[in-house]
Amino acid sequence: MKRTFNIAILLILALSFFNAAPTEFDKYDTKIAIIKFKTEVVDYGTITQNSDGTRLFTFTNTGDAPLLITKVKTSCGCTVPSYSKAPIMPGESGELNIKYDTKRLGAFTKTVTVTSNAEGGNKILKIKGNIIASK
């Protein structure tokens, strides 16, 4: 009697284990956000000192889950990002506004690191250009 009881318990545990194990088809049920930028490099070209340093990176969530940007970090304090903290739904687009301090003269190349829940982890964008003295 005790042996039959132990076998029944083991059978129940084994069945529950196999029932809870992921199947081959479970991997297709996972929804992910995918961030697709129109361009990953914004070239200011040659601009004059103290001109408008604001540029936009536009992107689309091409995934099937809401995209949430959690942090945007720039390579120096001369570049200031702004972005929406609201989720971007699948198929929708958003903008990342970058303002570079155009008081500084000379060529520049800076990076902007976007942290989000998108597939592939952090996305690194780049801005570049050359600032000349105004006449």
Image: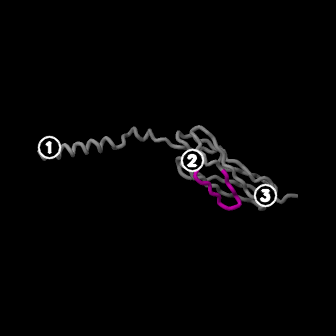
Residue underneath mark 1: 4
Q: Amino acid at mark 1?
A: Thr
Q: Secondary structure at mark 3?
A: strand
Report the Cα–Cα distance between label 1 and label 3. 84 Å
Quadrant of the rendering where the N terminus is positioned: top left
Q: Position of residue 62 (x, y in %)?
A: 57, 40
Quick check: marks 1 and 3 in contact, CB under 8 Å? no
Q: Indicate yes or no whether the magenta region holds residue 72.
A: yes
Q: Amino acid at mark 2?
A: Leu
Q: Position of residue 88 (x, y in %)?
A: 59, 43
Residue underneath mark 3: 131
Which stretch is magenta?
68-82
Please, is residue 51 above or below residue 87 in the view?
below
Residue underneath mark 2: 68
Q: Position of residue 81 (x, y in %)?
A: 67, 54
Which residue shows up at 56% across the image and 53% down it?
122
Left or right, 63 with reference to 75 = left
Please, is residue 47 above or below residue 64 in the view?
below
Report the Cα–Cα distance between label 3 and label 2. 34 Å
Q: Secondary structure at mark 2?
A: loop
